[in-house]
Every structure is written in C-alpha cells, then in structure tokens.
Image (cartoon, helix red, strand yellow):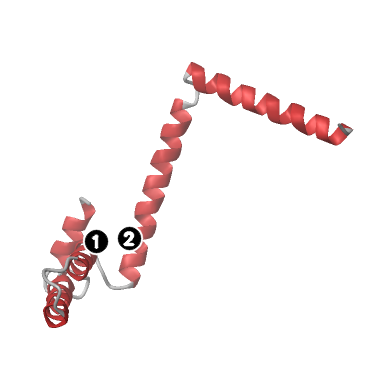
Amino acid sequence: MTSATYILAVVITAVAASVATAWMTGMLVPLIIYIRTYYTEGQKAAEEKALDAMGESKVSYGIKDTMKQTKIIDNKEVNDLQGGVGELVGGQFGNDGLAGGLGKGLGKGL
C-alpha cells in the first residue's frame, strides 16, 4: 500500500468506528431527530411555496390529482369527464376559487 492509501484507510476506519460507537450508545438519536424535523419543515415550506406559485392549495391539488389518477371505468370520455370535474372542483379550493380560504385552512392541517 502507498502512504496515501494507508492514511485514507485509517481515516475511514476511525470515522466508521466513531459512528458505530455513537450509534450503539444512542448519542446519534438527538441528531437524527433534529435532522428529520429540519428536513420535514423545510419540505413543507418548499411545497407550500411551489403550490402558491401555481395558484393552488394542498386541498385543490390533492383533489385534482386524485380525480385524474383514479379511473372509474376504462372509457376515454368518462375519464375525460372525471378529469374535468376534478379540475372544476379542485379549482374552487385553489387560491382564486370560491372556497380558496377554506382550501388554505384545510391545507394547513395536511
């Protein structure tokens, strides 16, 4: 082994041993909880900003998406009608819809 390879192997082994020790003693649990909380909050904020940019709320987007993906029967006309109904109903819960405030309020709980 060359000198650089030897040093790299020692460093990797030391890091692996340190992480394994911290994991087994439970010292990593608070760090993992913090990272999960930070990631979840950041993900929710990014999702809300993206939906606001599209003029949607979580409720309106969920209704539209569910109506498009759930097919009642294998008929193109019925599926198109179902998608149109989903767009119409979901649009009412969007930011500019009649129930926009309700959609935003319900979306906070999701």
Placement of the N terminus among the 4 image quadrants: top right
Q: In whole angstroms, how far apart are the C-alphas of marks 1 and 2?
A: 8 Å
Disc 1 packing (10 Å; few <14; some 14–19; many ≥20): many
- Extreme bottom residue here? 77
Is the residue under label 2 in contact with that under label 1 (CB below 8 Å)? yes
Nearer to me, 80 or 41:
80
Measured as percent of width and height from the top left, residue 43 is found at: 39, 52
Where residue 88 appears, x then y in whole percent? 14, 77
Residue indicated by mark 2:
48
At 37% from the left and 47% from the top, the residue drawn is: 41
Residue 3 lies, in percent from the top left, at 88, 32
Compared with 87, 69 (above or below) is above
| Badge 2 density bin: few <14, some 14–19, many ≥20, Cα 10 Å | some
Quarter where residue 101 is shown: bottom left
Vertical placement of residue 31 versus 88, above or below = above
**Three-letter code for the amino acid on which mark 2 is drawn:** Glu
* Quarter occupied by residue 50: bottom left
At 12% across and 80% down in the image, what residue appears?
A: 81
User: Residue reaching furthest top?
Assistant: 25
The mark nearer the N terminus, 1 or 2, is: 2
Numbered disc 2: secondary structure: helix
Q: Which residue is mark 1?
A: 58
- Taking depth in this image into account, of 67 and 88 the one nearest to the observer is 67
